[in-house]
Image (cartoon, rainbow, N blue to C red):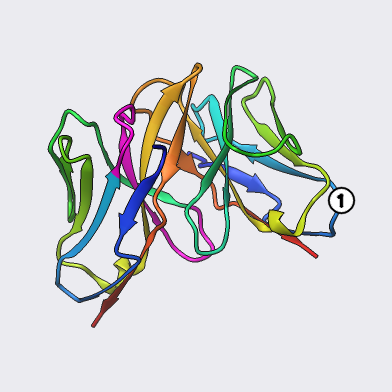
Amino acid sequence: QQQVKQSPQSLIVQKGGISIINCAYENTAFDYFPWYQQFPGKGPALLIAIRPDVSEKKEGRFTISFNKSAKQFSLHIMDSQPGDSATYFCAALIHSGGGNKLTFGTGTQLKVEL
Amino acid sequence: DAGVTQSPTHLIKTRGQQVTLRCSPKSGHDTVSWYQQALGQGPQFIFQYYEEEERQRGNFPDRFSGHQFPNYSSELNVNALLLGDSALYLCASSWGTGNNQPQHFGDGTRLSIL
């Protein structure tokens, strides 16, 4: 119940195309859903995040779509650029015992080709 | 505005040794969480510190322990190192443990066990 399932494992997109990464969860106690971007040798960097009472959030070229009833959410990268080539992780936050913790998906390696 | 800083960046130890990793949170943050990221995997939650107390703990053995200091910085200690402890150890900081508080990550400490 604590898992977050992420797909695809890897993705190749042409420059200017749309990259789509999907995640699904089971535990309805998750209440905050961030996406992170990670480059080799670096830590994950927060990209965008959404609460479960919102169906869509857009920041620049990045959009999260959230389907609470299906327990699924996705990241859309519009006008994908070679500089977007990185590993992307979805995550879900749960609160308990006076603290909270993030559960991460397994990651998607995105390559944007010229 | 300094982000999350971790030291050292790389560390090599042998089986059975003990190691201490350090983290300074982002300015204005008072909560520190530690994650282990194996190669090609998503980060796994180890524990979280707030107000100098461990607030949440993931599925890690007691060999993993931590501490938070009055200035909000934190240490992760691992005893009796095993080969399987080789990983990138990430520190994340946030403001409080309430809802919708994003966690910001440092670039990690790469620990190699020989």
Left/right of residue B71 with respect to residue A11 in the rendered view: right
Looking at the rendering, in which quadrant would you find the C terminus of chain A? bottom left
Choose top left, top right, bottom left or bottom right for residue A13.
bottom left
User: Looking at the image, which residue sits at the far front?
Assistant: A1
The relative height of residue A1 versus residue B107 in the rendered view (above or below) is above
Binning the other alpha carbons within 10 Å of mark 1 as few (below 14), some (14 to 19) or many (20 upward) gives few
The residue positioned 80% from the left and 65% from the top of the image is B114
The residue positioned 53% from the left and 26% from the top of the image is B31
- Image location (x, y in percent) of residue A24: 27, 47
- Image location (x, y in percent) of residue B100: 33, 28
Looking at the rendering, in which quadrant would you find the N terminus of chain A? top left
Decide whether the magenta segment is chiefly helix, strand or loop: loop
Whether B94 is among the magenta residues is: no
The relative height of residue A45 versus residue B50 in the rendered view (above or below) is below
Count the labels in the image. Answer: 1
Left/right of residue A61 with respect to residue B47 in the rendered view: left
Left/right of residue A109 with respect to residue B29 in the rendered view: left
Choose top left, top right, bottom left or bottom right for residue A68.
top left
User: In the rendered structure, which amino acid carries the disc numbered 1?
Assistant: Gln
Pick the front one: A102 or B93: A102
The residue range painted magenta reads A25-43
Disc 1 marks which residue?
B17
**Chain name for mark 1:** B
- Image location (x, y in percent) of residue A79: 15, 66
The residue positioned 38% from the left and 33% from the top of the image is A93
- Image location (x, y in percent) of residue A111: 31, 74
